[in-house]
Amino acid sequence: ENYYKQHQYDLNQLRQQLTNEFEKQKLITTPIIQTNTSIQDIEEIKKMYRIEIDRLYRENIELSQNQAKLIDTHQKQMNIMKKDLDDGYNNIINEFQHEQTRLQQRCEQLKQQFNESQQIIEQLKKNHFDDITKLKEKYTLEQDNRNRQENLQNRVDHLVILLEQSNDT
């Protein structure tokens, strides 16, 4: 509105200046004694100037209104583009956060699985060690039994030999 008032003031100034210039020019170029133009002609010229000034004034107002519409349209487009960009950035950020959360959960899940696997491995090692120890004990017992049997067999054989010798004598 201030722009419109300033514009109107400038147009009135221009109208006044043109009218004054026209009056001065008329006085300088035409001697008062030799006035070939009538007052009616002068009024007609003034009217033409006023019509032209009014036409320019209306054209300027129309141009200003069109410019304001263009600025408004541009501002709306900028707001729409800004909203689209903001929405896009927010979607990317949300997607990133979702993916980060998913990866953290997966990482925790893998850590838990790893720990469970470690426990299973340790348990298997312990069980396997226990099994090996039991097998070793069993083998040792069997070996001891064989050795005893062999010793006993050797004694029996020796006793049989001794008995045979004593019978022979």
Image: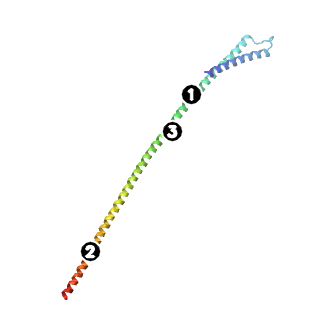
Identity of the amino acid at label 3? Tyr
| Residue 118 position in % (x across, y down) | 39, 55
Q: Which residue is mark 1?
A: 72
Residue 49, located in which quarter of the rendered image? Answer: top right
| Residue 8 position in % (x across, y down) | 65, 19
Q: Nearer the viewer, residue 102 or 63?
A: 102
Q: CA distance from mark 2 to mark 3?
A: 86 Å
Q: Secondary structure at mark 3?
A: helix
Q: Residue at x 22, y 84 (%)?
A: 162
Q: Secondary structure at mark 1?
A: helix
Q: Earlier in the sequence, mark 3 or mark 1?
A: 1
Residue 69, located in which quarter of the rendered image? Answer: top right
Give the answer, above or below, for where 17 lies relative to 116. Answer: above
Q: Nearer the viewer, residue 7 or 118?
A: 118
Which numbered disc covers residue 28?
Answer: none
Q: Nearer the viewer, mark 2 or mark 1?
A: 2
Left-right relation of 109 to 3: left
Q: Earlier in the sequence, mark 2 or mark 1?
A: 1
Left-right relation of 116 to 85: left
Residue 138, located in which quarter of the rendered image? Answer: bottom left
| Residue 79 position in % (x across, y down) | 54, 32
Q: Nearer the viewer, residue 114 or 144?
A: 144
Q: Which residue is mark 3?
A: 89
Q: Residue at x 47, y 42 (%)?
A: 97
Identity of the amino acid at label 1? Asp
Q: CA distance from mark 2 to mark 1?
A: 111 Å
- Looking at the rendered image, the quarter that the N terminus falls into is top right
Identity of the amino acid at label 2? Arg
Q: Which residue is mark 2?
A: 148
Q: Residue at x 37, y 55 (%)?
A: 119
Q: Earlier in the sequence, mark 2 or mark 3?
A: 3
Q: Residue at x 42, y 48 (%)?
A: 108
